[in-house]
Amino acid sequence: MTIKGNVYVIDDDAAMRDSLNFLLDSAGFAVTLFDDALAFLEALPGLGFGCVVSDVRMPGLDGIELLKRMKAQQSPFPIVIMTGHGDVPLAVEAMKLGAVDFLEKPFDDDRLTAMIESALRQAEPAAKNEAVTHDIAARVASLSPRERQVMEGLVAGLSNKLIAREYDISPRTIEVYRANVMTKMQASSLSELVRLAMRAGMLND
């Protein structure tokens, strides 16, 4: 059975956590349980992309505060909020803060799994995009100051000769730097290097 994706359940009610664990595990998701939102936020930097299913009313950090913090961190994780019966105002506030959907307890199991599947499907491109941007930034960070100058010269359209003159180094040395830049940036062509520089925000003059 292929795993449909990660789901992070946050609920202070142990019985609710167990039943969600059973339901989502049977539906083919990789489930991780948290008994409070702070524990989840602390673990967040190391977690793989997935859908968060959180209760709205919890002691300490509640679902609304969790949404605010996730939004402040610009997290790409979609969040489904579970509310008690008749908690519509809270549910509306949650949607305004970026929750993808909400469910009133007690809810229909199939409805929750369908909701998670659709949330993961819609949010995945953005998460992948974010991961790629991160990756490109790491490549730029791996350049030496001199390599970075050469890359900036290349994406500005300068020839090796002009870059050499600008930094007072021989064109042959520029060749070496240019080769290093292409390797470290994982670019197979100049046009690809320009595209990467754009993604890395190096061309926002």
Image (tube, grey):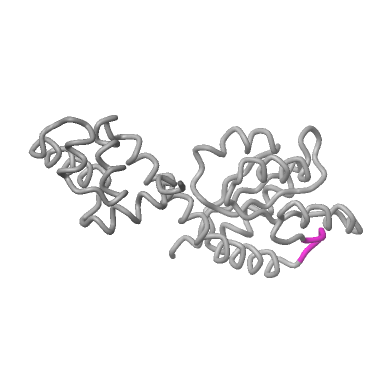
Q: Position of residue 140 (x, y in %)?
A: 34, 40
As displayed, is residue 88 above or below residue 43? below
Check if residue 85 falls in the magenta segment: no
Residue at 74% over, 47% down: 15
Q: Is residue 106 magenta?
A: yes
Depicted 198 relative to depicted 138: above or below? below
Q: Main secondary structure of the magenta part?
A: loop
Q: Quadrant of the N terminus?
A: bottom left
Q: Is residue 102 above or below residue 40?
A: below
View extreme (left): residue: 172
What stretch of residues is rendered in magenta? 103-107
**Residue 139, above or below 199:** above
Q: Is 35 or 42 nearer to us in this picture?
A: 42
Residue depicted at x 31% and y 49%: 156
For the residue pair 111 and 73, the one nearer the viewer reads as 73
Q: Is 37 positioned to the left or the right of 133 in the image?
A: right
Q: Is residue 123 left or right of residue 96?
A: left
